[in-house]
Amino acid sequence: MKLVKVTPHYKPGISLVQLNRPKELNALNSKVMQSLRDHLTSLDQDPKVKVIILTGNEQAFAAGADIKEMSDKGAIEMLKIDQFKTWDQIRKIQKPIIAAVSGFALGGGCELAMTCDMIIASESAKFGQPEIKIGVMPGAGGTQRLTRAVGKVRAMELVLTGKFISADEALQFGLVNKVVPVESCLHEAVKLATAIAKMPSVAVRLAKESINQAFETHLDEGLQFERKNFYLLFASKDQKEGMRAFIDKRDPDFEGD
Ligand code: DAK
């Protein structure tokens, strides 16, 4: 059975990637993470793909890193395996990734959803960083991304108690873009992906890069970074087409160059 199922051309410009370890609630063992990394990297290089949707199943997006795989490892063994490399490669995917989350998104599963660029949650979704309950703490960006998304006091409560929050709370906290019924979760993600896929892809790529830079730098450096990407877009054909189409009062015909 494939641990990660991929439909590269699910809809025009949109790929669907599905975590597929249902019996283990999509627990993220190293094989799943490597396969996910390989698929995302290859989709990132496919010019026909504009947006990627990452999903799980109705029970779980992912219930965390695989506790059974990790439980007996020592610190040096963990360090040598260096799974962070895989996670870092996923973080560096240039195309937008939308997480469509139903069921559990816990620990590494919540971190994986937060590594994506947007999250559509179904009413059944449950988010949490319960690592504290098994004697560890978030290890794939949870303390950083959750804090940036929901603020310090909420992140403290979630990480220090390990409690789960509902999709509605996640929406209220600013962790997800939208909450929808379970049966329309994928459909909503496709709607969002379709809107983005129609946009000029060079501008989408540089805009994603610039937004992510907001988390890496001080405001002044971030503004400089944004400015350079803004200037760069004036070298793209789609900029000429987009502005010309506006002036001509017609729809733009973007080619992705
Ligand atoms: N790992 C391994 N197996 C898991 C799992 C997990 N995280 N979560 C669930 N399973 C397995 C269960 O063991 C069970 O398998 P069998 O016993 O049937 O063989 C099956 O999935 C169904 O689970 P349950 O029987 O427990 O189902 P329930 O509905 O009763 O409960 C639950 C669902 C999600 C509340 C419960 O399964 C649960 O609490 N799961 C663990 C959640 C958790 O603690 N997650 C955080 C794990 S630590 C790193 C990157 C990331 C991380 C670490 C390092 N590096 C880059 C180095 C992240 C760490 C974590 O995520």
Image: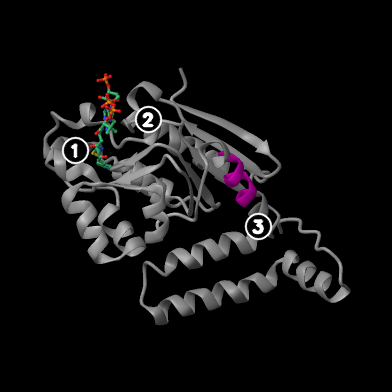
Q: Indicate the amino acid at tag 2.
A: Asn
Comes first in the chain, label 1 or label 2: 2
Can you see residue 92? yes
Horizontal and vertical percent position of residue 162? 20, 46
Residue at the farthest bottom position:
220
- Label 3 neighbour load within 10 Å: few <14, some 14-19, many 20+: many
Label 1 with label 3: CB-CB less than 8 Å: no
Q: Indicate the amino acid at tag 1.
A: Met
Horizontal and vertical percent position of residue 89? 41, 47
Q: Residue at x 33, y 33 (%)?
A: 28
- Label 1 neighbour load within 10 Å: few <14, some 14-19, many 20+: few
Q: What residue is shown with label 2? A: 26
Q: Which residues are magenta?
A: 186-193
Residue at the farthest top position:
1
- Asked whether residue 212 is drawn in magenta, I would say no
Numbered disc in front, either 2 or 3: 2
Q: Which mark is residue 208?
A: none
Comes first in the chain, label 2 or label 3: 2
Magenta part, dominant SS: helix
Q: Residue at x 50, y 63 (%)?
A: 209
Depth check: 192 or 54 in front? 192
Whether the residue carrying mark 3 lies under 8 Å from ligand 1 is answered with: no
With 155 as the anchor, is 36 left or right in this view? right
Can you see residue 45? no
Q: Which mark is residue 201?
A: 3
Q: Which mark is residue 78?
A: 1
Judged from the image, the secondary structure of the residue bearing numbered disc 1 is helix
Quadrant of the displayed image that contains ligand 1:
top left
